[in-house]
Amino acid sequence: MPPMSLLKPRFSEDPKFRLRALLAGLIVCISIPLIFLVIKAYTQFQWEMYYEYRWTAKHMVKDYGKKIKSFVAKEEARPFSDYQFYKLSSNTMLDKKRVMLSPLVNPVEGESFPGLLGYFQIDEKGELSSPILPFEDKQKLIETGLHFEPGEVDERLRTLHEITKILVDKGMMNDPSAILASKRVEFIATGSSREDRKVDNERTPLRIPKPPRPPKAAENSRTESGWTPLKIGDSYVRENKDEPAGSKSYKENIEFIESKVEIGEFSIIEGSASHLLAVRRVWMGEKEITQGFAINKYDLIESTLLKMLYLVDFETPVMVKIDHGDGNISAVLPEMTNGRQTFKLVKEDLENFEEEFLFSELYAPLEHVGLKFSTNKIPMSSTSALAIYLMATVIVIVFVGMWVIYRLGLRQLKLNEERLNFVSAVSHELKTPLTSIIMYSDMLREGMVSDDDKKKRYYDFIFFESERLGRLIENVLRLSKLSRQNQGIQLEYTTIGSAIDLIQSKVSTLVEKNSIVFNIHLAANTDAEMKVLIDPDAFSQIVINLMDNAIKFSKNKDGTQQSIDVYFERLSAGSGKEQVRFSVRDYGPGIDKANSAKIFDLFYRAGNEMTRTTPGTGIGLALVSELTTAMGGRLELVNHKPGAEFCIDLQAKS
C-alpha cells in the first residue's frame, strides 16, 4: 500500500480529482436523506391507503346493518291488513269500499325485503293465513276466478309449505297435520257423518273461546284502524248484514269487520339454518296475532352485499368472502364487463387475493356471518403517488444538477488550463522573438556586425519577427474584443480583385520568409469584378491566421515548404442570393477526425503541451470562426489526401 504522502499530493494538486470528490460527497450527503425520505413517505402512503381501504370496508359493514334496519323500518310502516290475501280498499271521495288483493300477494321486486320467501299471519288459535294463497285447495282456487300463471299455484304451495314447516319447527303455530289427525280420531269416535256436521254448523253459530289476556304491548307500538276479513274454516262469512254489498268479491262470502289494533315492532329471529323470521305482534282487543315474513338468509346477505359493492369505490378489484357461520362459504368476485367493473357470486370457497385488509362480523341478527375483504394489491392514492413522483423528480433534479455542475466545473477547469497554456504560449511567443530582436538590434547598434549580408539577415529577422509579434498582439486584441462582445465589424461590398490585392499585401512577408509557393486561383464562373460582403480588417485577420496555420502544418519531412493555394469560386445559394467561396488549401498531413470538431475552440491546440514543436497560442482558428460568423459567413473544414482546406462562404453580388 503506497504511503499517504504519495496520495496526498494527488488530492491536493489534481483539480479534477478534487471536483469529483467534492461532488461525490455532496451527492452522498443529499441523496441519503432524500432516499430515506422517499422510502419513509412511500411506506407511510401505503399504510394510509391500507387504512383507507379498511375504513371503507368497515363503513360498508356498518352501512350493511343500516340497510337491513331500513328494510325493517319499511316493513314496520306496512298496515296490518296487508297480511291477509284480501283487503278492503276505501275511496273517501266516493264513499265506497271494494275488495281487492293485498299488495303482498305479488310483492314488487326491488321494493320488498331482500331474500324474501313470503309473508304470513298466525291468529290467536295458532292457525296460519298468508297473502301467498287464501287456501290450499287448487280446485277451489280455480273456481274463485283467481288468475295465476301456469305452475304458479304449485310454486306458491311449495313456498307456503316451507313457511309452515319453519313456523311449526319454531313452535309458533300448530302443526296442521296433527290437527287433521285429531279431527279424524274425533270423527271416528263420534260416528257422525260429514253431512250431519255441516248441518249442525249451519244451525248453531260458532262460538270462539276467549283466549287468555295477551301481554301488554310494547311502549313504542302504534295503533291503527282498518277492515279485517273474518275467516271461519276455509270460508269468509258475513256477520254484519249492514256492510255494503260491494265488499263481496271473487264469488266468496267475504265479510270485513272494522278493527282497532295495536301493532308492535318487528324483531328478527332465527327460523332455521338457512332462514330468518321477521315477526311482530298485533293486539286486536284481547286477541294476539303474529305477523311477519320469512327470509332466505343466504339470499339476503349475498344480494344486499352485491348491491352495496356497486356503491363503494375501491381503486382496485376487491373480493369479499362470506362465511355464513354454518360451514357454508361463498364469495363475491370482481370482473370486467364491457370495460366496466361488475361482480358475480360464486358458491364455493376460493383462495383470497394477495392482500387481506379486513375481517368483520355483521351486526345482529347476522352476527355469526363474517366478511373477509381482500385485493391483489392496495395502490397508492393519486395524491400520494403525486407526492412520490415529486420527490423522485427532486432527486432526479439534484443528480442532474450535480452532473451539470460537474460538467461546468470540468469545462471551467479546462478553460483555466487552456488560459494558463495560452499565457505560457503568449509569453513564449513574445519572449523568444523579443530576446532575438534585442540581441540583433544591440549588435547592430554597437557596430559589432560589419558584413553587409549579415546585416541584411539581421534586419530581415528583426522585421519579420516584429511582424509576427504584431500579428500576435492583433490576435490578442481581437480576442479581447470578442470576450466583450464588441467586435466592431463594418461590412462593405469589396470586389474580388481588391480582396486578392489585400491578400497579397498581407501575406507577402509570410510567403517571402517561409519561401513557399503561393497561388491564388479564380474559378471560371467567377469574375474579379464580383463583389463580396466583408470587413477588410477582419478579412485580413482571417487570411493571415489561415495562412499562418497552413504554413505551420505544410512542411515536408526535410523541412521544405509545400505550396499553398487560395481559391475564389462562385456558388449558387438559391432564393436569388449569391455567394462566393473563399478557401485556403495546404498539402500537409491534414487534421484527424478527433480534432476536427475542436480546432475552432478557443485556446485549443492539438497535441501535448510538453512535446509540441509548432508555435502558436490556440486563438488563431477560434478568431477565424468568430470573425466569419460576424461577417455573416460560414466556415467549413474539408479534409483532403493530402492536406486540409478551410472554406469560407461569403455573401456576394454581381
Image: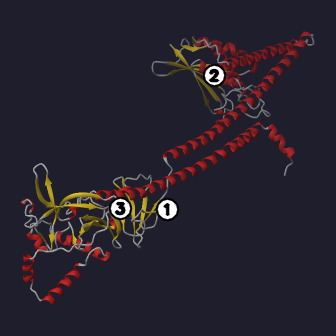
**SS state under label 3:** strand
Q: Does residue 16 appear to the left or right of 1 in the view shown?
A: left
Instruction: Indicate the amino acid at tag 2.
Output: Glu
Instruction: Indicate the amino acid at tag 1.
Output: Glu
Q: Earlier in the sequence, mark 3 or mark 1?
A: 3
Q: Position of residue 652 (x, y in %)?
A: 53, 16
Pointer 2 residue:
626
Q: Does residue 511 appear to the left or right of 295 in the view shown?
A: right
The residue nearer to you, when weighing 382 against 588, is: 382
**SS state under label 2:** helix
Check disc 3: other Cα within 10 Å, few if <14, some if 14-19, many if 20+.
Answer: few
Q: Residue at x 56, y 14 (%)?
A: 533
Q: Quadrant of residue 370 in the image?
A: bottom left
**448, above or below 592, in the image:** above
Mark 2 to mark 3 CA distance (whole Å): 76 Å
Do tag 2 and tag 1 residues touch (Cβ < 8 Å)?
A: no
Q: Does residue 113 appear to the left or right of 25 in the view shown?
A: left
Mark 3 to mark 1 CA distance (whole Å): 19 Å
Pointer 1 residue:
354
Q: Residue at x 24, y 71 (%)?
A: 124
The residue nearer to you, when weighing 457 against 174, is: 174
Pointer 3 residue:
344
